Amino acid sequence: MLKSSVRSARSATSNYSVRASRKVAAAVLAAVLSCGIVWAGDTPDRAEVQRLANEAVATAERWIEVGEPEKALKLLHLAVQEARLGGVDTVPARFMAAQALLQTGRYAAAAQILGQLSTERPDTDRFQLDYAAALFALGRDDAAKAVFRDVLRRERLPPTVRRNVEGFLERIRDRQRWRVDLDIGFWHDNNVNNASERETVDVPLLGGVLLPITLDQRPVRAWITRTGVRLHWREPVIEGGRAYIETRLSAARNTALSASQHNRTWASLSTGPRLGYTVDIAGQSRPGLAHADLGAEWRWRGGEAYAASFWAGMGIDQDMAAEWRTGVSARFWITRHEGESTDADPLGRSLGLRISRRIGPGWLTAGGTLSREEPERRSLRWTSREVSFAYVTDSWRDWSLSVRVNLTETGFDDEHPLFLTRREDRTHGLGLTLAHRVLAREGYLPEINLNWARTASTIPLHDRQLQTLRLGLRRLF
């Protein structure tokens, strides 16, 4: 009977260890299996039935904790039967049975129980959350997303619970075959036309004489609105999702308010395979991802076609340890400029290497990139070297924070025909992105982006200082 079953199981679990006697476990299991009709004769006291049911749930919970969910299920099955006969609440026993089923990987059975509990007790967050998690494990993403979103709309949801729910929704978004994201922003640009900041420059003449020349173009300040959309499509090639084709299509327009001649429009398309794999590193199996892309981008300036680029890229991202990641990528491209001689159209290539280390709630990434462009016109050929450091976190007290610092040095092959010296640019950049999840609405998070860049060039025409303050909208799920 239930009373003896609970007593036997409780005694066994209280003394349980990894070295527990097989005889004791077998005796407990036999006691559970041998239970017949418990309440023969007189009708049992309801309070006693409730007490025994509570003890059965507590005992089953201990069985689950020590890795014996099957024994817990047998005891809970008995507890539910007796609770129904005694007219007491069966919800705790059924909920604990769902936990045991989840531990054994029987998600469909767990989802059935949790779905019933969610209908009976719609205001209990835990039932809804576990039901959605079971649906997620079954791959029923649309149903899971609907339940998770319903929970998010509830008031007084603890921040940690809210963050976990958002994490599930982000994972659902990431594994969707089709995804549509908005690209929206609003900022002020102090040099939208990328003009020299100098009013005059000194041009050397024969005999060391310097001739001051007044520049006819000055920096234009403007407020910019960005509107765009990004489409993402993932097509599995091998069952299980380890290999798939990823295609991205995006279009965006930067509208310069009161300076329409400086409007900018982009459209790009890229596609390529992704292959997930695992390798053995220091005795541990570590995941990695190999990827390749073919793509094209078209650009318009002030409503007229400006340039088109076509590229091919490849790379590998590899987990080295629990808190270390590394990646390498290579890229090749060709650009065609509208209305210019073809000898100014470059062939380019770049090689990048990065390594990341988890520090606190985020990742610190150090990277380096070497780039080269070689048009037929020798005076336009250049080599660039960039070093960058970035720290990114999404989980520091609900703050999303990204800080990036970079140094880029670009050198041209030939002397400038007017200034009679080789052009060498050195650019320092600093970027900061900040957001707080309390401001998120329906999966969209407003964020602030600050960018500053300073370029010092041996050719004074190319000295620049750019500052932007941008308000954007990022989709979380």
Image (cartoon, helix red, strand yellow):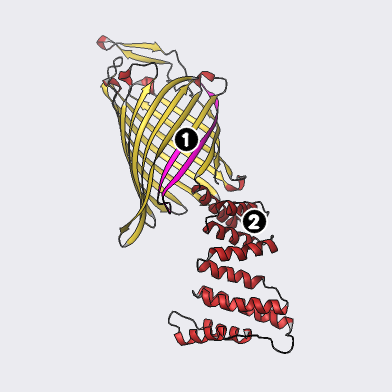
Magenta region:
220-249
Question: Going by the picture, which residue comes out furthest to the bottom?
Answer: 41
191 and 199: which is toward the camera: 191
Circle 1 sits in a helix, a strand or a loop, which is it? strand
Label 2–label 1 contact, CB within 8 A: no
* Membership of 234 in magenta stretch: yes
Q: Residues within 10 Å of mark 2 (few under 14, many from 20)?
A: few
Q: Which residue is mark 1?
A: 249
Main secondary structure along the magenta-highlighted residues: strand
Could you tell me which residue is drawn at 60 percent across and 45 percent down?
440
* Membership of 240 in magenta stretch: yes
In this picture, is 80 found above or below 360?
A: below
- C-alpha separation, residue under disc 2 versus residue under disc 1: 37 Å
Q: Nearer the viewer, mark 2 or mark 1?
A: 1
Could you tell me which residue is drawn at 34 percent across and 41 percent down?
314
Label number found at residue 315: none
Q: Residues within 10 Å of mark 1 (few under 14, many from 20)?
A: some
Could you tell me which residue is drawn at 43 percent across and 31 percent down?
453
105 and 313: which is toward the camera: 105
Give x and y (percent) for residue 352: 33, 40
Image check: 143 left or right of 455? right
Q: Amino acid at mark 2?
A: Leu
Could you tell me which residue is drawn at 50 percent across and 38 percent down?
231
Image check: 297 left or right of 419? right
Q: Which residue is mark 2?
A: 157
Give x and y (percent) for residue 224: 54, 27
Circle 2 sits in a helix, a strand or a loop, which is it? loop
Question: Who comes first in sequence, dot 2 or dot 1?
Answer: 2
Give x and y (percent) for residue 87: 73, 77
Q: Is residue 397 visible?
A: no
